[in-house]
Amino acid sequence: MLSWVILIVLAAAYLGYAITSRLMLRRYLTTLSEADFRAGERKAQLIDVREPNEFKNGHILGARNIPLEQLKMRKQELRHDMKIYLYDSNGSRSARAAATLKRLGYRNLFDLQGGFKKWNGRVKKGI
């Protein structure tokens, strides 16, 4: 009986954490549709947070590759006064990248809904 209670409490705590994290994420990260992303990408810093091999296989035209794991080390490459448009394969890494950038003092963070897999715009194809 006690093990079931502990299991239920742990599940509820995890669910509460997940919901709270998602709500906090919405405070500083705006998810954009492809049309909205495309409309603003020329006025923003376009950052692909995928790994270099993924980037080389194809990326959105004009994007710079700063992998998620390198964001802290390469923060000086990003401007604080411009919007930052993030994307990855499907949206999960760009959300983590946004959390990292927020902790580093960046604002105006946006990500591409569905990530690169859903992108139908211009791309630079890999070799």
Image: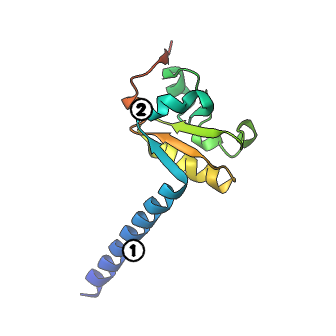
- How many residues crowd around disc 2 within 10 Å: few (fewer than 14), some, or many (20 or more)? some
Q: Give the farthest residue toward the right.
A: 76
x 39%, y 69%: residue: 14
Mark toward the start of the polypeptide (2 vs 1): 1
Q: Residue at x 48, y 20 (%)?
A: 57
Say which of 12 and 46 sits in front: 46
**Horizontally, is 33 left or right of 106 in the view?**
left
Residue 39: percent from left, percent from top: 50, 29
Name the kind of residue labelled 2 in the image: Glu
Q: Nearer the viewer, mark 2 or mark 1?
A: 2
Residue that label 2 marks: 34
Please state the horizontal and vertical placement of residue 61, each as a whole percent of the image.
Answer: 54, 20
Q: Position of residue 72 (x, y in %)?
A: 69, 46
Q: Is residue 24 left or right of residue 46?
A: left
Q: Residue at x 49, y 47 (%)?
A: 30
Residue most toward the bottom?
A: 2
Helix or strand or loop: what does disc 2 sit on? helix
| Residue 65 visible in the picture | no
Q: CA distance from mark 2 to mark 1?
A: 34 Å
Residue topped by disc 1: 13
